[in-house]
Structures are given as C-alpha cells and as structure tokens.
C-alpha cells in the first residue's frame, strides 16, 4: 500500500506532491464555501423538476452542492490554466575559464525540479514556463555559478563561462 501511495503522490519527485497540495487547498476552500452556504441555506434548498407535465420538488443539500460545485470549478480552472501555459526552451553552453566545454555540468532553473546535465560540448536545454526572468544555477564539481536570465536573452543560445578559481583549486577533468 505504501508503494502505491508513493507512486501516486510522488511520481518523479515533487510534481505530484505539489499537485496534491494544490488539490487539498482547493478542498479546504470548498469546505469554507460549504460552511457559508450551510449558514445561508441551512443545508437545504429546493429544486423544481418538471417531467411529463408533472411538477415535482426535490431537496438537495445546499452546503454539499456548494462544496462540489466549488471544488469542480477550481480543479477544472487550475488544470486548464496549467495545460495552456506557454512554454519556452532555454538553450545554452557552459564553458570552463580556458574555453573548453564543461561536460556533465548540472544546470538547473530555480523553481523547477531536478537538473539537466550538459553534453560533451557543454550544451544544455531546459523547458520552462514563459515569464520575464529565470535564475539559473550551474554546478560543476565543487564550483557553483548563479546567473539571471531575461526573456530577451532567449533570442540567442546563451553562453555561460564558469569563474576562474584560485591557484589552489582546479576544475575536475572533463
């Protein structure tokens, strides 16, 4: 059972965990709406149904209906917004101070899970949601470099050069 819960909730790290948190917040908000409706409608309402020339009245739980309607609205709105969010591809190179490519450097974007390794030519590609700027972190051995990237910078392949180290430190072999 534990493995099933982990697979459902933590697929590839934190993405599903974050989604579960969002849905829990939606459920909590829906419960607040239900409590307000309970106070206003005293948990009941009337619905008039007309079928084949006979009018019938049916009762329904106003608070429960408010909870379901609010929850469904929030979930549908959230999934639609995340599906249609425009995405961009950040392409770049990471170089050592001597100009050689930094092979297997780890490149990550703040706010995204995981990192992307550079290939033998120091190239990397990361898909991101469209926004005005991103903070990029490059890790190569013990060296960490932070870089701020603006939307206008994505017109070209970005080039990042790791900083020079003191004479006591050396970069790991490529």
Image: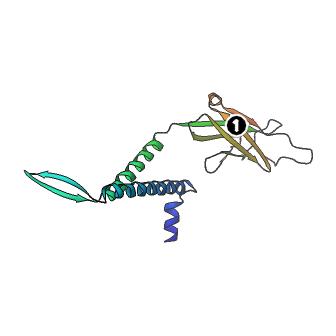
Residue 122: give x, y in percent of width and height: 71, 40
Residue 169: percent from left, percent from top = 88, 48
- Check the image and report above or below for 107 versus 22: above
Nearer the observer, 174 or 38: 38
Give the vertical position of 18 relative to 83 (above or below): below
Name which quarter of the figure residue 130 lies in.
top right
Neighbor class of circle 1 (other Cα within 10 Å; few <14, some 14-19, many 20+) is few
Tally of numbered tags: 1
Image coords of residue 146 (percent x, y): 74, 42
Task: Please name the colour scheme applied to the rendered image.
Answer: rainbow
Query: Does residue 50 appear to the left or right of 100 in the view shown?
Result: left
Q: Residue at 61% of width from left, 47% of height from top?
A: 112
Residue at horizontal 61 percent and vertical 41 percent from the top: 126
Q: Is residue 165 left or right of residue 131?
A: right
Residue at the bottom extreme, as displayed = 1
Q: Position of residue 155 (x, y in %)?
A: 62, 28
Between 6 and 105, the one nearer to me in the picture = 6
User: In front here: 70 or 72?
Assistant: 70
**Which quadrant holds residue 17?**
bottom right
Say what secondary structure mark 1 lies in: strand
Q: Which residue is mark 1?
A: 148
Residue drawn at (35%, 58%) of the image: 38
Q: Residue furthest right?
A: 167
- The answer to whether 154 is drawn above or below residue 68 in the figure is above
């Amino acid at each position: 059972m534990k493995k099933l819960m982990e697979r459902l909730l933590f697929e590839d790290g934190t993405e599903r965990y974050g989604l579960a948190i969002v849905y829990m917040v939606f459920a909590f908000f829906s419960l607040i709406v239900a409590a307000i409706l309970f106070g206003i409608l005293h948990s009941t309402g009337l619905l008039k149904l007309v079928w084949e020339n006979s009018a019938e009245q049916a009762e329904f739980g106003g608070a429960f209906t408010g909870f379901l309607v609010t929850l469904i609205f929030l979930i549908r709105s959230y999934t639609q917004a995340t599906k249609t969010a425009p995405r961009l591809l950040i392409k770049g190179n990471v170089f050592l101070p001597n100009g050689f490519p930094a092979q297997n450097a780890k490149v990550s974007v703040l706010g995204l899970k995981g990192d992307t390794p550079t290939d033998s030519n120091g190239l990397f590609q990361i898909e991101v949601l469209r926004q005005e700027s991103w903070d990029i972190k490059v890790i190569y051995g013990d060296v960490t470099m932070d870089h701020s990237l603006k939307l206008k910078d994505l017109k070209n392949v970005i080039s990042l050069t790791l900083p020079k180290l003191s004479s006591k430190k050396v970069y790991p072999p490529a």
